[in-house]
Image (tube, helix red, strand yellow):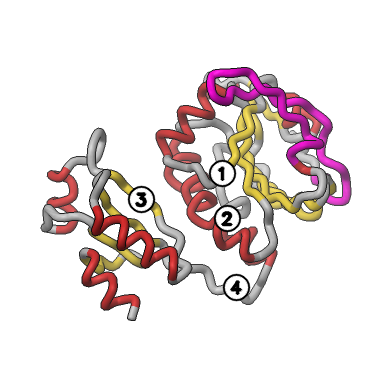
Amino acid sequence: MSLKNLEGKQVPDVTFRTRQNNEWVNVTSNELFKGKKVALFALPGAYTPTCSSSHLPRYNELVPAFKKLGVDAVYCLSVNDTFVMNEWQKDQNAFNLKMLPDGNGEFSEKMGLLVDKDNLGFGKRSWRYSMLVNDGKIEKMFIEPEKDGDPFEVSDADTMIKYLDPKNKLPDTVTIFTKPGCPYCKKAKEALADKGYPFHEVEIGGHVTMTHLRGITGRTSVPQVFIGGKHIGGSDELSQYLK
């Protein structure tokens, strides 16, 4: 395996087959990258453990921080079809990101980063990497080291943020538990947004129940907010904290 670093080169010219509003929409590299500053991260597969627990969520969380640093959009690419990528985006509530389905591996192959994952039953997949693209030209790449398994050391969102601004102080991770239609939840989210805190919202219902919330916080009311791993509490307690 010999992985390519294409810094200084143009991104590959391909057409992505996407599904939008129940219709097929072709999206070209030119449309995605021309005249834009873009952070792209690529990973082996939707729904896989590291991709779902760490790689994608942190990029989605930090999109507001990227935009403050002049990045127009953040793209997530994987060698999966558009249906899988769309469902994964919904499952992860990752709507800050644009999902790029490289279903045939054409983009990954032209990047020199299509690798064989036959040992896992995956077939051909993208190696894990990230890159900053400025008007279609690759400015910087962070390619994971050539090791066995699935290394995740340099293509994370925090590393890319620090490249953009070495002195940048990354915001604390914020998680807020909410319920649909809750006015106090709406108030808390607005307060976090006003203070510039990007947050991950977890809605009660489906996979996460009030029983889970009570087990985590000892409470059954929403919202419940965690900042930097510390339980802040509800809407009023959050207001006090932010003051």
Q: Quadrant of residue 232?
A: bottom left
User: N-terminal of the two: label 1 or label 4?
Assistant: 1
User: N-terminal of the two: label 2 or label 3?
Assistant: 2
**Mark 1 to mark 2 CA distance (whole Å):** 12 Å
Circles 1 and 4: CB distance less than 8 Å? no
Circles 4 and 2: CB distance less than 8 Å? no
**Mark 4 to mark 2 CA distance (whole Å):** 13 Å
Circles 1 and 3: CB distance less than 8 Å? no
Residue topped by disc 4? 168
**Mark 1 to mark 4 CA distance (whole Å):** 21 Å
Residue topped by disc 2? 157
Residue 96 at least partly seen: yes
Q: Any magenta on residue 18?
A: yes
The x and y percentages for residue 221 are: 14, 55
The 10 Å Cα crowd at callout 4, few under 14, some 14 to 19, many 20 or more, is few
Residue drawn at x 52%, y 68% is: 170
